[in-house]
Image (tube, rainbow, N blue to C red):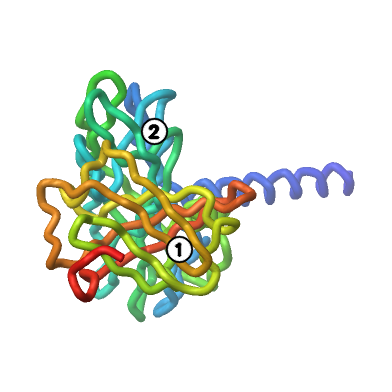
């Protein structure tokens, strides 16, 4: 009898634990092309302690959604959060996308799955932490479909520890660009120039640039790479809005000899002297 009772209690504890873990993700929005949920990287909310909230997309095979700069077509997802009073949320931390041709244009997109995370700072004096979100996105394959919906997630207040969904945030974090350690400049003809220790033909076998804003470069044009010890140049083709007197911002993807990719945030001011070197 004692053994049966022990097994029963273990089952109940496991069931309660599973339900608690499930409660850290919202009921999904489900369409023919995607399933979208709101998830948390912490199992509870601690007043004043930041945690991350994520909009998690699982996309049907072949369908894609867009980065903050969608490229030659499309539009990025929009997230409108309603949080408890005095809580604060950052903007979306955008993982580095893929370059996805779409008809006659190049887009910057996500395939298969992606987590778009924000950092939330809860205020003091909470007894609960309800979150609602209005979400809209454009999803494309051979055709494009606008989709939208509402999500709700109620998080308990208490000592926080990593949730069952925390690995999703770690995977997204691996593709978040980090500030570049290299000096950067852009020439009048839109050649991106980087200098600094660690640049070499061994550490940079391939590189491509994703502009932060539409129109700054021709997204479809070839990007010609040249690398020497301590120096990298990437010849870009100016786009409709390229301004040789303004800084060029975006993400540089660098692939080394092992195939590992690094993602660097670039802010390249105009090259001093106004000429390519």
Q: Nearer the viewer, residue 263 or 147?
A: 263
Q: Is residue 258 above or below residue 82?
A: above
On the image, the x and y values in percent for residue 40 come to 45, 56
Q: Nearer the viewer, residue 107 or 244?
A: 244
On the image, the x and y values in percent for residue 153 come to 37, 52
At a point 40% along the width and 51% down the height, the residue shown is 96
Q: Nearer the viewer, mark 1 or mark 2?
A: 2
Q: Is residue 29 above or below residue 241?
A: above
Looking at the rendered structure, which numbered label has been put on residue 35? 2
Quadrant position of residue 242: bottom left
Quadrant position of residue 234: bottom left
Mark 1 and mark 2 lie on one chain; the one further toward the N terminus is 2
Left of 163 or right of it: where is 86? left
Q: Nearer the viewer, residue 127 or 163?
A: 163
Q: Residues within 10 Å of mark 1 (few under 14, many from 20)?
A: many
How many callouts does the rendering have? Answer: 2
Q: Quadrant of the N terminus?
A: top right
Q: Which residue is mark 1?
A: 156
For the residues labelled 1 and 2, the Cα–Cα distance comes to 24 Å
At a point 20% along the width and 31% down the height, the residue shown is 146
At a point 42% along the width and 43% down the height, the residue shown is 114
Q: Secondary structure at mark 2?
A: strand
At a point 23% along the width and 56% down the height, the residue shown is 190
On the image, the x and y values in percent for residue 203 come to 57, 58
Q: Residues within 10 Å of mark 2 (few under 14, many from 20)?
A: some
Q: Is residue 204 above or below residue 32?
A: below
- Inspect this view and state whether residue 257 appears: yes
Left of 113 or right of it: where is 82? left
């Amino acid at each position: 009898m004692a053994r049966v009772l022990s097994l029963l209690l273990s089952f109940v504890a496991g069931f309660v634990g599973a339900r608690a873990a499930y409660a850290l993700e919202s009921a999904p929005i489900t369409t023919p092309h995607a399933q979208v949920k709101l998830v948390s990287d912490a199992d509870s909310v601690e007043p004043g302690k930041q945690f991350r909230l994520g909009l998690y997309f699982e996309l049907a095979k072949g369908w894609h959604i867009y980065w903050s700069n969608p490229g030659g077509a499309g539009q990025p997802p929009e997230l409108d959060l309603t949080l408890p009073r005095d809580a604060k949320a950052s903007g979306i931390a955008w993982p580095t996308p893929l370059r996805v041709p779409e008809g006659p244009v190049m887009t910057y997109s996500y395939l298969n799955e992606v987590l778009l995370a924000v950092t939330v700072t809860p205020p003091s004096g909470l007894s609960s932490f309800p979150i609602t979100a209005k979400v809209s996105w454009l999803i494309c394959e051979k055709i494009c479909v606008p989709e939208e919906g509402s999500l709700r997630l109620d998080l308990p207040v208490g000592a926080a520890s990593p949730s069952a969904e925390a690995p999703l945030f770690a995977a997204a974090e691996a593709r978040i660009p980090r500030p570049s350690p290299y000096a950067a400049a852009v020439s009048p003809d839109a050649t991106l120039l980087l200098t600094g220790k660690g640049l070499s033909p061994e550490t940079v076998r391939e590189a491509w640039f994703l502009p932060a804003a539409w129109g700054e470069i021709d997204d479809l044009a070839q990007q010609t790479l040249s690398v020497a010890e301590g120096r990298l140049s990437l010849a870009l083709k100016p786009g409709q809005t390229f301004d040789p007197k303004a800084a060029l911002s975006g993400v540089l993807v660098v692939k080394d000899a092992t195939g590992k990719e690094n993602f660097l945030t670039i802010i390249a001011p105009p090259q001093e002297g106004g000429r390519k070197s």
